Image (tube, rainbow, N blue to C red):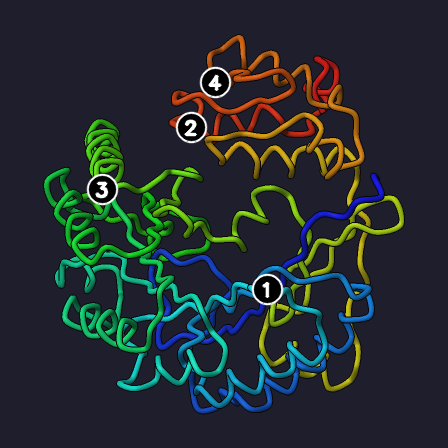
């Protein structure tokens, strides 16, 4: 690896939700009488204390509280957690601290308290402004809750607010998808995550797909109309499903996509750190109970070195989500591998019109490549056939 280390972020997983949505494949668990938030925060701080020495005093550019539903945790619990983060890590002066929240779990007055606790960026899981659609998606909020949460965020002086919105929902047509997006744009959020519903394995929707999902042509029409609306409203598409007003890109997620380093604490949290001439991954126990028991026993899983061929694929898996693409020098700096490791696959993608070279030493997906992103990413899988053909 090059001596220069990539930026470093911290991810914190808060795993509980009020209910499990039928499309969700995240490591989330239904909150019940055994949900012990204080015990979990203690476990997070023990986890962080164990991780901190491995970070070597490196500056942390972003902190992301994800879930699950972090807003199930009280403001004083979030404050205790963030105080522990400040005490153990070196945060840059303008550190971005994001917390996910669902409109149905935000109680009046809480957002101001989260802001006072140190959260400076909010991500609201809206998904739709159609009450009937929200019910089909298993959400516990309605459109009125979204507007109430938005007004609360404004009152709490959150300048950086992201709205999560989906399209290609059951029974949805292009007109309804555009109406949802117009509702979001009317609020003029700093950032929008706008993405297609996908049927992920191990979800209820995957096991029993809704019968009225829109067809491929309808989905393409939704996407084309939505991209035009977003561009017309002044939002830059800086990642395949992320759109921001100038100055409001999500620093945390951008660090993932640019293959930076990140520490992960919490149930099922993943981390990737550059050290000792390679990259190392660590995954925490997934179930909250097992995670808390591991924290209390001081029994953590070891870090595992990432194989070079897997590093190359993981870099491309992330970088190809960026319309701006990547530089060959960045690939080498972040993976420790020569660009020749992926040059063959890049050349084939270029020949198929899926990638282009806007400048010497720089590559990016074409509009067609972004539309066929899964196919493009698959070209970099570390298969034996791919290696014989000159890919990774």
**Quick one: label 1, few (<14), some, or many (20+) residues within 10 Å?**
many
Marks 2,3: beta carbons within 8 A: no
The residue drawn where x is 36% and y is 39% is: 236
Q: How many marks?
A: 4
- Between the C-alphas of marks 4 and 2, the distance is 8 Å
Foreground: disc 2 or disc 3: 3
Give the SS element for disc 1.
strand
Residue 339 is drawn in which quadrant? Answer: top right
Instruction: Classify the position of the C terminus by image quarter.
Output: top right
- Between the C-alphas of marks 3 and 1, the distance is 31 Å
- Between the C-alphas of marks 4 and 3, the distance is 27 Å
Q: Which residue is mark 4?
A: 354
* 302 on left or right of 9: right
* First-in-chain label (4 vs 3): 3
Q: Which residue is mark 1?
A: 11
Give the SS element for disc 4.
loop
Give the SS element for disc 2.
helix
* First-in-chain label (2 vs 3): 3
- Between the C-alphas of marks 4 and 1, the distance is 32 Å
The residue drawn where x is 63% and y is 18% is: 345
- Between the C-alphas of marks 2 and 3, the distance is 21 Å
* First-in-chain label (3 vs 1): 1
**Quick one: label 3, few (<14), some, or many (20+) residues within 10 Å?**
some
Residue 390, image x and y in percent?
Answer: 72, 15
Residue 11, image x and y in percent?
Answer: 59, 64
Give the SS element for disc 3.
loop
The residue drawn where x is 69% and y is 22% is: 342
* 46 on left or right of 32: right
Which is more toward the observer, 246 or 39? 246
Instruction: Classify the position of the N terminus by image quarter.
Output: top right
* 352 on left or right of 258: left
Residue 266, compared with residue 326, is above or below; it is below
């Amino acid at each position: 690896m090059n001596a220069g280390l990539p930026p470093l972020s911290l991810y914190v997983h808060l795993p509980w939700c009020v209910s499990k949505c039928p499309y969700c494949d995240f490591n989330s668990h239904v909150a019940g009488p055994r949900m012990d938030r204080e015990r979990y925060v203690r476990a997070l701080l023990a986890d962080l204390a164990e991780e901190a020495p491995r970070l070597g005093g490196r500056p942390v550019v972003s902190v992301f509280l994800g879930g699950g539903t972090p807003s199930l945790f009280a403001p004083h619990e979030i404050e205790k957690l963030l105080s522990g983060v400040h005490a153990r890590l070196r945060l840059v002066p303008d550190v971005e601290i994001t917390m996910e929240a669902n409109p149905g779990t935000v109680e009046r007055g809480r957002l101001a308290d989260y802001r006072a606790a140190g959260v400076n960026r909010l991500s609201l899981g809206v998904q739709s402004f159609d009450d009937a659609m929200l019910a089909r998606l298993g959400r516990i909020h309605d459109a009125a809750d979204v507007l109430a949460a938005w007004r609360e965020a404004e009152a709490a002086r959150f300048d950086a607010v992201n709205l999560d919105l989906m399209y290609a929902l059951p029974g949805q047509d292009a007109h309804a998808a555009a109406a949802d997006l117009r509702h979001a744009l009317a609020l003029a959020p700093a950032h929008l995550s706008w993405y297609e519903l996908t049927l992920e394995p191990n979800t209820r929707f995957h096991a029993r797909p809704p019968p009225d999902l829109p067809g491929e042509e309808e989905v393409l029409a939704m996407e084309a109309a939505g991209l035009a609306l977003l561009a017309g409203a002044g939002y830059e598409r800086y990642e395949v499903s992320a759109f921001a007003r100038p100055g409001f890109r999500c620093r945390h997620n951008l660090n993932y996509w640019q293959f930076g380093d990140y520490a992960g604490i919490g149930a099922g949290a993943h981390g990737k750190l550059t050290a000792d001439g390679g990259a190392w991954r660590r995954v925490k126990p997934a179930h909250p109970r097992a995670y808390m028991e591991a924290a209390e026993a001081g029994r953590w899983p070891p870090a595992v070195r990432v194989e070079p061929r897997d590093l190359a694929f993981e870099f491309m898996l992330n970088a190809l989500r960026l319309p701006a693409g990547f530089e060959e020098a960045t690939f080498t700096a972040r993976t420790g591998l020569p660009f020749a490791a992926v040059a063959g696959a890049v050349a084939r993608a270029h020949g198929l019109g899926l990638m282009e070279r806007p400048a010497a030493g720089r590559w990016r997906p074409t509009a067609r490549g972004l539309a066929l992103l899964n196919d493009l990413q698959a070209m970099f899988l570390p298969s034996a056939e791919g290696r014989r053909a000159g890919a990774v």
